[in-house]
Image (spheres, grey):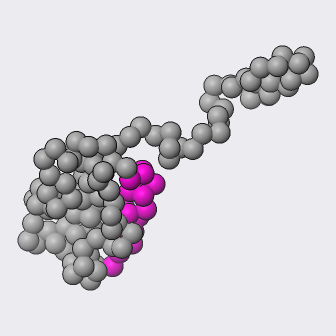
Amino acid sequence: MTGTRLVLLAMGAVVAGAGCELTLPGADDGGDAATDAPAQTVGEQCATIVTEFCKQWTGPCGGAATASLADCINNDMPTCCAGSACNAVSPSSAAAVATCTAAIDVEDCNSVMSLGLPAACQGVPLED
């Protein structure tokens, strides 16, 4: 019933010639979620990617025999970013990070163990 009432209110504003834009709560404002999202730091994006990779490496791919998840993350983070570079705002989009983590999830264990990150992760996150 609430949705119907909102539609009727919006239609009434148009019919009455209110001449203003009405954005209802929860309505899509036409923005792009990827560009509307708050900026992420290089470190945040690295942590997301490294954690996803290490979950795959230590979990289904059997790397836990040589390192724990925490050890894997601690060892791999410096290869993604280190020091003040981690605090910089990343120019890589959240969508690029999501594409990377999705590629990690479907990467076969042979590739995980021998090649590391899939091609979809190359250059993500970018640093200015």
Q: Is residue 28 above or below residue 71?
A: above
Q: Position of residue 53 (x, y in %)?
A: 26, 64
Given residues 79 and 108, the one toward you in this image is 79
The residue at 80%/24% (across/down) is 10
User: Which quadrant of the figure has residue 15?
Assistant: top right
Secondary structure, magenta segment, majority class = helix
Residue at the far front in the pictured view: 128
Q: Is residue 32 above or below residue 110?
A: above
User: Which quadrant of the figure has residue 119?
Assistant: bottom left
State the quadrant of the N terminus: top right
User: Which quadrant of the figure has residue 74?
Assistant: bottom left
Q: Is residue 87 above or below residue 47?
A: above
The residue at 42%/58% (across/down) is 96
Is there any visible trace of residue 101 in the rendered image?
yes
Q: Is residue 28 left or right of residue 52?
A: right
The residue at 42%/51% (across/down) is 93
Given residues 3 and 125, the one toward you in this image is 125
Q: Position of residue 36 (x, y in %)?
A: 50, 39
Number of numbered markers:
0
Q: Which residues are magenta?
A: 92-108
Q: Is residue 10 left or right of residue 127?
A: right
Q: Position of residue 104 (x, y in %)?
A: 34, 68
Q: Is residue 88 magenta?
A: no
Q: Position of residue 14 (x, y in %)?
A: 86, 23
Q: Is residue 79 above or below residue 84?
A: below
Is there any visible trace of residue 69 in the rendered image?
no
Q: Is residue 60 left or right of residue 25?
A: left
Q: Is residue 103 magenta?
A: yes
The residue at 14%/68% (across/down) is 64
